[in-house]
Image (cartoon, rainbow, N blue to C red):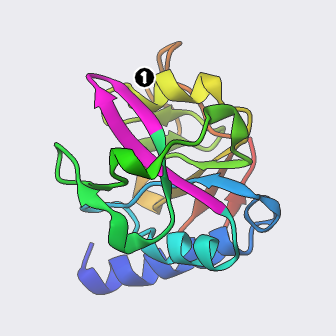
Amino acid sequence: MTEAEKRRGDGVLIRRLLTLPAFEQARTVFLYLGVGAEPDTRPALRAALARGKTVALPRVTGPGLMEAGRVRALSELRPDRYGIPAPPPESGTVPPECFDLILVPGAAFTRDGGRLGRGGGYYDRYLPQTRGVKAALVRAFQLFPALPIQPHDIPVDLLLTDAGEVLIP
């Protein structure tokens, strides 16, 4: 994927997310900051803050464990042990049951919401504690007819694709 293709796809994904009723209606959102080939989610973070939503990002607390660190401004984020911008501990946390919408990253997805993460199990341990809608931003090359899904791999409730589709399993 070229940088221009990535930017174009990111724009489609973020516009689709920002117009999603689940996002528009959400008061509390759990997002992630995309790194590498992941979509750049900073525009979604900025939009959520501008709309007065309570926003949180993942903060690693131990091997395979994370919590939701509250974010009030992008400028407060600091690189965590993996180099990913995260809220500092003093920013406070948001309890997992408070989220209306959770944006879930993944390496690969099926059209029925099956998801393979990056192998650390952070989200698979965290998501069972949540009640909100679980959504994923998915590039076309990440969609597969089938994946080796394990019982502990938590699926998502809807997928937003870079073709502008919303797939609801």
Name the kind of residue labelled 1 in the image.
Pro
Looking at the rendered image, the quarter that the C terminus falls into is top right
Comparing 52 with 146, the one in front is 52
The stretch drawn in magenta includes residue 62: yes
> In terms of image quadrants, where is residue 41?
bottom left
Disc 1 packing (10 Å; few <14; some 14–19; many ≥20): few
> What residue did someone put label 1 on?
148
Q: Main secondary structure of the magenta part?
A: strand
Comparing 134 with 68, the one in front is 68
Give the residue displayed 78% in from the left and 68% down from the top.
24
Comparing 14 with 169, the one in front is 14
Residue 29's x, y, as percent?
A: 64, 54
Q: Is residue 19 visible?
A: yes
Residue 112's x, y, as percent?
A: 66, 38
**45 sits left or right of 167 in the view:** left
Bounds of the magenta segment: 54-67
> In terms of image quadrants, where is residue 1?
bottom left
